[in-house]
């Protein structure tokens, strides 16, 4: 069965050892995106801490870039990966994260981006 994904259009995965850390240079596409949208880098740094606060130390966070097929523009996707057993709590945590931080932070970065929630 495929992993369900919740995408919040209002609303970053990486292995963790005690605390989430973004893979700053997972690929050249993310690096290029950050160069094109400098406001994104501090947002990713802050997002690491927010993932820990809202989803716990076992959650992982990773940024990736994909081209939106409709607009043909690159988007930054922030993947938050949680344990399947905590899925319901994670869905609630994503809603709180959106309302309490992400919507305003994303708007300030002024770049096409969203958060995704996945489970192992």
Image (cartoon, rainbow, N blue to C red):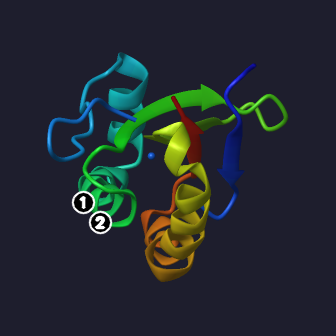
Q: Is residue 107 left or right of residue 71?
A: left
Which residue extends farthest right? 70
In this rendering, the answer to whether 70 lies above or below 56 is above
Given residues 23 and 67, the one toward you in this image is 23
Position above or below: 30 against 60: above
| Mark 1 residue crowding within 10 angstroms, few (<14) / some (14–19) / many (20+) | some
| Image location of residue 20, percent across then percent down | 24, 45
Q: Residue at x 31, y 56 (%)?
A: 56
User: For the residues marked 2 and 1, what is the alpha-carbon distance in whole angstroms?
Assistant: 6 Å
State the residue lying farthest toward the left: 18
Q: Dot 1 corresponds to which residue?
A: 49
The reply to whether the C-beta atoms of the residues labelled 2 and 1 are less than 8 Å apart is: yes
Residue 96 in percent (x, y) is at 53, 75
Residue 39 shows up from this direction: no
Near-viewer residue (32 or 114): 114
Looking at the rendered image, the disc whose residue lies closer to the viewer, 2 or 1, is: 2
Secondary structure at badge 2 equals helix
Q: Position of residue 15 (x, y in %)?
A: 28, 29
Q: Residue at x 70, y 57 (%)?
A: 9
Q: Which residue is mark 2?
A: 53
> Which of the 4 quarters of the picture holds residue 72?
top right
Res 117 label: none
On the picture, is 43 further left or further right than 99? left
Q: Is any part of residue 42 visible from this angle?
A: yes
Q: Quadrant of the N terminus?
A: top right
Q: Residue furthest bottom?
A: 100
At 55% from the left and 36% from the top, the residue drawn is 119
Q: Residue at x 69, y 47 (%)?
A: 6
- Classify mark 1: helix, strand or loop: helix
Q: Is residue 62 above or below residue 105?
A: above
- Residue density around tag 2, few if under 14, some if 14–19, many if 20 or more, within 10 Å: some
């Amino acid at each position: 069965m495929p992993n369900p994904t919740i995408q919040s259009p209002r609303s970053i995965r990486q292995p963790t050892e005690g605390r989430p850390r973004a893979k700053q240079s997972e690929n050249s596409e993310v690096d290029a995106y950050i160069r094109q949208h400098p406001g994104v880098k501090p947002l990713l740094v802050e997002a690491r801490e927010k993932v820990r606060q809202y989803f716990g130390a076992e959650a992982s966070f990773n940024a990736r870039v994909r081209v939106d097929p409709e607009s043909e523009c690159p988007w930054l996707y922030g993947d938050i990966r949680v344990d399947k057993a905590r899925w319901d709590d994670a869905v609630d945590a994503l809603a709180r994260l959106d309302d309490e931080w992400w919507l305003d932070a994303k708007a300030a970065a002024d770049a096409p981006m969203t958060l995704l929630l996945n489970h192992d």
